[in-house]
Image (cartoon, rainbow, N blue to C red):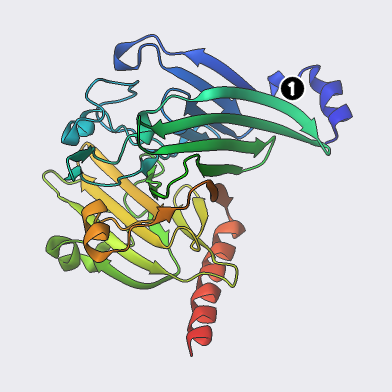
């Protein structure tokens, strides 16, 4: 329908779609600024006080994302205290790890780097929540800027844009990391994208253009045949982490798909392997911690110490910018089958290129 048609039927687009700011008033989320976006079939919330990470996603009323036992959390005094971060990591559709550490906490030359870094609890500045017509499309957009810096040290700025279109099934996240310093800076950036019940259920499966997969630890390697399909929740089950080497197209684009056949529903996660060459899968089938996480990253899941030892730490050049993109696309029916075909074609094309 055209803009004119829609306005004729509704008078205001708020009947169908909106971008709406509010403040949470309960528990450890008390005071948390949120921006809720509804584009028709999709509804999600971005946390303005926590890096504009998306805390939850629904499609047609079905919950897609994972929320951990701590529930919705605002910023806490223990967020960046080593492994105490586990008390506030709530999952969400995705959260941002970095900008100078991912995974476990560590210390280098007297500098402490907390679990998954500091950027995930950094509040947004210059927050803008907007909805507008552009070239016949109704755009819903949230933007903000998060800064990770300290006196006599780094000065990294993450500018995030979250964008969707009315009546579409896609969310696009564009991050621009700006090193506003006259010195190069370590830059580690990982996006754990987390899927939970009821979208995640026994039989939910992954479709990945995987060329090679290995377990992070011995117990993950011992269960290497289990990475593709979710089981029922099991008491006492450990978590598993799998490292995937993914095929990509000639432009470096790749993707991962997670599918619930009973719901006839899938989510396609798109990203660029040129600047996110690492991809990890986090699987927990434990009761109460039931989740599959898909994690594109510019750094290894082995973390900061690994890259320091290998001499492979990614550096952001002085006065430079790097752009990272993620897309979440809902798939239904034939769209799921086409994604599977695209996955196989990507793997086959990669093999031919390597030959």
> Can you say which quadrant of the picture contains the N terminus?
top right
Q: Position of residue 77 (x, y in %)?
A: 24, 20
Residue at 43%, 64% in the rendered image = 208
Image check: 216 left or right of 75? left
Work out whether 68 lies above or below 242. Answer: above
Is residue 260 in view? Answer: no
In the displayed structure, would residue 187 be above or below residue 20?
below
The furthest residue to the top: 25
Residue 332 higher or lower than 53, as above or below: below
Residue at the outermost left position: 236
The reply to whether residue 163 is visible in this rendering is yes
Which residue is found at the position 88% from the left and 28% from the top? 4
Residue that numbered label 1 is attached to: 13
- Asked which quadrant contains residue 69, the reply is top left
The percent position of residue 212, horizontal first and vertical second, equals: 34, 73
SS assignment at label 1: helix
Measured from the top left, where is residue 39 in percent x and y? 64, 31
Q: Nearer the viewer, residue 52 or 101?
A: 101
Q: How many marks?
A: 1
Quarter occupied by residue 224: bottom left
Q: Residues within 10 Å of mark 1 (few under 14, many from 20)?
A: some
User: In front: 43, or 241?
Assistant: 241
List x then y, in percent, for residue 180.
50, 39
Residue in view at x 51 percent, y 23 percent: 125
Q: Nearer the viewer, residue 9 or 74?
A: 74
For this view, does 157 lie left or right of residue 308? right
| Residue farthest toward the bottom in the current orientation of the protein | 355
């Amino acid at each position: 329908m055209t803009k004119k048609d829609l306005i004729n039927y509704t008078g205001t687009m708020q009947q169908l779609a909106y971008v709406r700011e509010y403040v949470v008033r309960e528990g450890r989320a008390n005071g948390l600024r949120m921006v809720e976006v509804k584009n028709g079939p999709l509804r999600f919330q971005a946390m303005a006080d926590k890096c504009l990470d998306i805390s939850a996603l629904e499609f047609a009323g079905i919950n897609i994302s994972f929320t951990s036992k701590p529930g919705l959390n605002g910023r806490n005094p223990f967020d960046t205290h080593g492994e105490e971060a586990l008390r506030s990591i709530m999952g969400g559709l995705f959260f941002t790890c970095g900008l100078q550490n991912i995974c476990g906490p560590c210390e280098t030359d007297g500098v402490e780097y907390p679990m998954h870094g500091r950027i995930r609890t950094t509040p947004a500045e210059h927050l803008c929540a907007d909805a507008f017509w552009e070239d016949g499309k109704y755009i819903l957009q949230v933007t903000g800027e998060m800064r990770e810096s300290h006196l006599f040290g780094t000065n990294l700025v993450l500018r995030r844009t979250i964008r969707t279109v009315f009546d579409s099934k896609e969310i696009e996240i564009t991050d621009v990391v700006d090193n506003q310093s006259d010195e190069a800076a370590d830059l580690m950036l990982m996006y754990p994208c987390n899927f939970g019940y009821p979208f995640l259920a026994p039989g939910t499966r992954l479709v990945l253009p995987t060329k090679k997969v290995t377990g992070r630890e011995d117990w993950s390697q011992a269960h290497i045949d289990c990475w593709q399909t979710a089981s029922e929740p099991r008491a006492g089950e450990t978590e598993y982490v799998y490292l995937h080497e993914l095929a990509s197209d000639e432009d470096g684009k790749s993707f991962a798909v997670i599918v619930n056949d009973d719901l006839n529903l899938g989510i396609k996660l798109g990203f660029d392997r040129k600047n996110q060459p690492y991809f990890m899968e986090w699987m927990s089938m434990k009761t109460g911690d039931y989740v599959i996480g898909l994690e594109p990253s510019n750094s290894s899941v082995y973390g900061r110490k690994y890259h320091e030892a290998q001499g492979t730490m990614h550096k952001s050049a002085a006065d430079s910018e790097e752009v990272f993109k993620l897309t979440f696309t809902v798939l239904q029916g034939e769209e799921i089958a086409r994604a599977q075909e695209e996955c196989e074609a990507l793997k086959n094309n990669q093999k031919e290129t390597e030959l």
